[in-house]
Image (cartoon, rainbow, N blue to C red):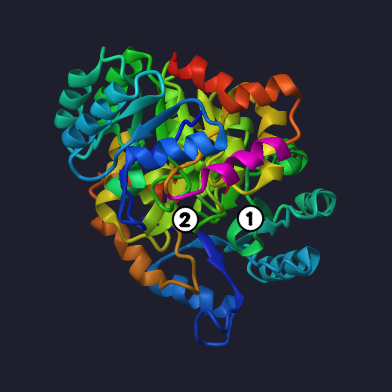
Amino acid sequence: MKTIDMHAHTGDFTGFIPGGHHSAEELIRKWDESGVEQGMISILDQHDMTAANERTRQTCARYPERIKGYIYLYPHDVQGSIAELERCRVDACFRGVKLHPSNDVYYPFFEGYYPLYEAIEKAGLPVLWHSGTSPYSHPLQIAVVARDFPGTPHVLAHFGLADLTWECFPAARIASNVMVDTSANPIVPVLNEWIEHFGAERMLWGSDFPFYDVEYERQKLAHLGANDTDRELIASTNAQRVFGL
Amino acid sequence: MHCHVIAGSARQRSEYGIDELLASMDAAGVEAAICSVMGDDQTSENDSIAAASERHHGRLYGYINLDPRDPQSALAELARRVGDPRFVGIKLHPANHAYFPFAERFRPLYSAIEKTGMPVLWHSGTYPNSTPLQIAAVALEHPDMPCVLGHFGLTDFAAESVAAARLAANVYADTSIQTSLPLLRAFVDEVGPHRLLWGSDFPLYVTGYELAKVALLELAPADRELVAGGNARRLYRI
């Protein structure tokens, strides 16, 4: 089964996880061990969006067949983010936007950010949102944005994590362009309930490497109570459709 | 006009009775109040509110406190109270009772509440299961049920109250223990003065200090009347 990891990172996350710098080579090795064919990475740096995105671009350039990237943006600087979006989006290695309201400390629904969301919608890029951390990354906070920008697929990373997993359900009810990724969320019965409620088209598999283990995350796919068609949608077909891979 | 007080037992203090409530209202010049008693026995709690409202007719009204963890008994308790003029609203506290408001198993209860026309005062602002947007998601699916966000989402979720009111037109908020005057003003500017209600959350908070907030909001006189009591009289039909 073709498998695409739509949620990974490279870099040094000392203080969060051990291991120093987690390189693209380490990521590729993990993917190879688990039969993952390709994936998407983001690099976050609230002090310098451009530097972060340049590192992403260089990493993609080393593995053009296997790695695509997210444009990381920092909405506290709306105009700078719009300029960075315009600068990056012409490069086909970028297939989405990454937003992390929890790390970067902002409420997604603040209307001051709406010019940026409008630019993202115009660029035709999906958004991968960190979700599940309080108080800034609740699924419903993101769904408010999704409802106001129906042209953009909005992916709730981590399926709302443990505390807010259930909040993904009303988020999906109020905005049909809300999707979820499975990374770091081990609550398989609730993942299954999502598939029953909304079908498999709105769920994406991702590992969140290096914070989580690619192989352990991949094995989750086997534990889902989904048929083979649905499993394949989650493992790769949805990502191909959403990110144009 | 209070729209949010707690009579009876309050967790942080021992026993607060109706006499203390009335004394605090007299001292602050508050005409009428709507009270709830919260604990683990909805029927006896609602009985005590009914008795207090009976004794202080026109001054005290009651919320029907419901515990929806057992949806059938909550429906039965609602049916027992509907039509009793002493009760003018519903009180729900998803944080104390530990449930997510948007769970689909509560839909029959919400539909029954919606049919009564009574507003629901929701505790709001406590993580993870009483956030304003969780309540707005319910409001969106029950457009004829006015949903009042008690405490305006407290500290972490005050900003979310504004987004919740943007999302659903039947979302209201009360001012009790909310100290972010800039966000209360933003709420009035963005969604209108007809959706903000004053409340004290007595006895956990001090009525006079809560009331001082109304003057500092710097509202137009007509809007101040709405927030202080006009909205409550309209919404709760008293």
Residue tagged 1: A98
Residue A132 image label:
2
Q: Is residue B9 above or below residue B26?
A: below
Chain label for disc 1: A
Residue at the spot 27% in from the left edge and 22% down from the top edge: B54
Residue A46 relative to residue B167: left or right: right
Disc 2: host chain: A
> Three-letter amino acid code at disc 2?
Gly
Magenta range is B204-216
Residue at 35% across, 48% down: B95
Residue A201, visible in the rendered structure: no
Dominant secondary structure, magenta = helix
Name the residue type under label 1. Lys
Front residue of this view, candidates A173 and A8:
A173
Relative placement, left or right, of B214 versus B129 is right
Q: Nearer the viewer, residue B25 or B42?
A: B25
